[in-house]
């Protein structure tokens, strides 16, 4: 058996929360020995969908992140557990043995992703098991099975789905600074954007089809986008804490140039272009 991996494409997630409902349906009131005891009907979300509101009116976007246990290869929760109750299967899934857990809560405090929950009634810690009982039967985890947009994929490292997901656009881990070696790979994780609206300095009318070029001053490469019918532009996928040279051009207007630092999302507001003499 190869190592299992969750593959999440953030751009495909609509925030419908069907994964949350399916997880509840699968685990509330159900025991799957030896992997898990029943999940409480309230207070626990072994998978949650985190909305991330970004930008400012009128240029606002919402991104949804389906977040559950990352089944880390260097799991802080395992190191924190003094009873060796947190274990890793041969396929890479990390699970909390309900028969060995004492409910001390150290794993809850140790988890950097905040995806471990305390079941006070049973006196144990609980989290996503990767639906180990279903995997052993040859089925997909419920969250994967129910997702209407295929935003969550469950694959063996040897599967074509894994190689297709990791081909081309680089797959990432969530919060690599934790150095937890998670077995969840992501595409489309939010990165800083540079946005704004281009206006005629005299008429105060929007300028559509203006060319905006962004040059990364710390690396090779540039990106060019054009303003839409409302004069708005979006340069997505910028790296955090970088400096970019921004140039806005439109025939009949003087060019606008600026240096933009991406400490976070940058909205330049209304950029007014002057007509050439």
Image (spheres, rainbow, N blue to C red):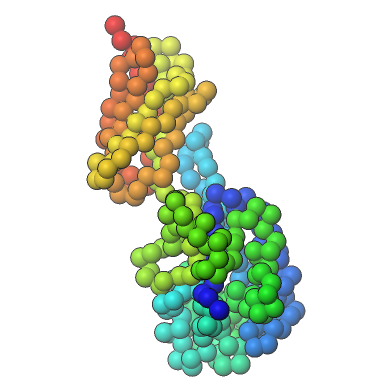
**Left or right, residue 17 beside residue 190:** right
Q: Residue furthest left?
A: 218
Foreground residue, 219 or 105? 219
User: In the image, is residue 270 above or below residue 245?
Assistant: above
Does residue 16 appear left or right of residue 264 in this picture?
Answer: right
- How far across and down, in percent of the image, does residue 216 sit? 29, 41
Residue situated in front as seen by the camera: 134 or 202: 134
232 relative to 42 in the view: left or right: left
Q: Residue at x 41, y 37 (%)?
A: 235
User: Is 239 located above or below residue 159 in the figure?
Assistant: above
In the rendered image, residue 190, in percent from the top left (x then y), is placed at 46, 50
Residue at 52% from the left image edge and 42% from the top image edge? 61
Q: Position of residue 20 (x, y in %)?
A: 66, 64
Up/down of 125 relative to 178, above or below: below
Q: Is residue 99 visible?
A: yes
Return the x and y of residue 104 as percentages of the image width and height. 51, 88
Q: Quadrant of the N terminus?
A: bottom right
The residue shown at (59%, 66%) is 154
Q: Nearer the viewer, residue 153 or 112?
A: 153
Left or right placement of residue 161 versus residue 18 in this view? left
What's the residue at 45%, 91% (across, down)?
82
Give whichever of 226, 18 is nearer the camera. 226
Work out whether residue 41 can be spotted: no
Quadrant the C terminus occupies: top left
Q: How many labels were placed on the picture? A: 0
């Amino acid at each position: 058996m190869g190592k299992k991996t969750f593959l999440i494409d953030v751009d495909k997630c609509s925030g419908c929360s069907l994964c949350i409902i399916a997880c509840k349906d699968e685990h509330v009131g159900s025991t799957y020995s030896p992997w898990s005891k029943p999940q409480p009907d309230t207070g626990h979300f072994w998978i949650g969908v985190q909305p991330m509101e970004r930008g400012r009116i009128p240029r606002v976007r919402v991104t949804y992140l389906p977040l559950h246990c990352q089944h880390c290869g260097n799991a802080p929760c395992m190191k924190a557990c003094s009873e060796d109750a947190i274990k890793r299967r041969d396929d890479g899934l990390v699970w909390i043995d309900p028969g060995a857990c004492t409910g001390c809560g150290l794993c809850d405090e140790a988890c950097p992703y905040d995806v471990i929950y305390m079941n006070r009634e049973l006196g144990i810690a609980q989290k996503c098991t990767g639906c180990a009982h279903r995997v052993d039967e040859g089925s997909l985890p419920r969250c994967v099975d129910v997702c209407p947009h295929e935003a969550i994929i469950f694959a063996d490292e040897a599967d074509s789905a894994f190689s297709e997901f990791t081909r081309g656009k680089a797959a990432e881990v969530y919060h690599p600074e934790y150095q937890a070696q998670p077995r969840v790979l992501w595409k489309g994780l939010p990165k800083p954007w540079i946005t704004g609206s281009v206006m005629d300095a005299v008429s105060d009318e929007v300028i559509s089809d203006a060319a905006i070029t962004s040059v990364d001053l710390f690396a090779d490469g540039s990106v060019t986008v054009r303003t839409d019918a409302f004069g708005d532009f979006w340069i997505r996928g910028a790296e955090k804490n970088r400096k970019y040279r921004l140039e806005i051009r439109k025939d009949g207007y003087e060019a606008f140039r600026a240096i933009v630092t991406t400490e976070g999302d940058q909205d330049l507001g209304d950029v007014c272009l002057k007509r050439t003499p």
